[in-house]
Image (cartoon, helix red, strand yellow):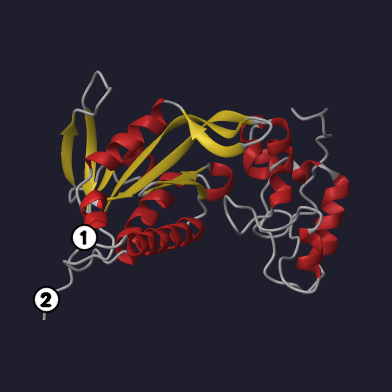
Amino acid sequence: MRGDNGLPLQDTGMDRQPGDLDPRSHTGAERMGRADLKLDRRVRRLRRLWRTIPSAPRCKMCNSPFGAPAGPLLRYIGKGRWAGNSEYCSGCFQYLYKNRDGAEIECTLLFADIRGSTQLAESMSATDFRALLNRFYSTAAEVLIEHEAIVDKFVGDEVIGIFIPALAGENHAGQAIDAGRALLRATGHETDAPWAPIGVGINTGEAFVGVVGTADHVEFTALGDNVNVTARLASAAARGEILVTEAAARAAGVAGDVGPERRRLDLRGKSEATDVFVLTLARAPVS
């Protein structure tokens, strides 16, 4: 029997180590998370070989080392850190990029953008505003990667993260909510003067996740109505707020919590109102 990409389905589980992804636990639609690597005996042998090379850190999927001495050499054959999540190597996603592949799966989306960026830009030099955005991008990427997200892209004053089951686990919605809270803390929202005033939107649902683009430019991204809903939530969130849809709250197991405020929003372009939970951080006392 062969998988969707033609590779033999021969994984018995004998080669896996703690923390390895089990290909039998994922459908063919989730191959973007495991990049089909675990289905190939030759690749499994390479994984065992790379595991013996003392060059940590290494790719969380295939074990190829990033550190010296082997890491710099492997970068020449496409095994450098992946732009979507630096804890994985580009080689693990080579098939997807080569074939513009992807699938419609359940995932969780996180959008975060800076509130009042126009006023901020007006209050400082263009160089200082660029420095602020770079600090925000760097901080957001670090937080997202720590929570097993794929960093989709930076758009103006906004960052987009994708949490898929094959990387973030079955509790991808919970991972996204934890990432949203961590991002608020990292940008200073436990005080009254955050260095980057942001609002966050989180939503769980079906989306196309994979590679799109032309021969000259490709991107790993998520597409669909649920992506649009998440973008609208981020735009509606006030400074220091995380707006979480009921679908994401249910998936994360927080829908029954008494504490969070609930709000009904009329999002632009949506025919029906959207019910959300409003999460914030406790403010540090002013001394």
| Residue at (45, 26) in percent of width and height | 224
Q: Is residue 243 above or below residue 120?
A: above
Please tell me which residue lies in front, 126 or 175.
Answer: 126
Residue 171 appears in the picture as rendered:
no
Residue 185: % across, % down = 31, 65
Q: Residue furthest bottom?
A: 287
Answer with the quarter of the image where residue 235 lies.
Answer: top left
Q: Secondary structure at mark 1?
A: loop
Amino acid type for the residue under numbered disc 1:
Ser
Residue 17: % across, % down = 72, 59
Answer with the quarter of the image where residue 47 lies.
Answer: bottom right
| Residue at (26, 62) in percent of width and height | 124
Q: Secondary structure at mark 2?
A: loop
Mark 1 Cα-neighbour bin, 10 Å: few <14, some 14–19, many ≥20: few
Tell me the residue that label 1 is attached to. Answer: 123
| Residue at (81, 54) in percent of width and height | 77
Which quadrant of the figure contains the N terminus? top right
How far apart are the alpha carbons under marks 1 and 2?
A: 26 Å
Tell me the residue that label 2 is attached to. Answer: 286
* Position of residue 5 in the picture relative to residue 166 (left or right): right
* Position of residue 225 in the picture relative to residue 166 (left or right): left
Q: Is residue 198 above or below residue 273?
A: below
Q: Is residue 167 above or below residue 274?
A: below
Amino acid type for the residue under numbered disc 2:
Val
From the image, state whether disc 1 or disc 2 is nearer to you. Answer: 1
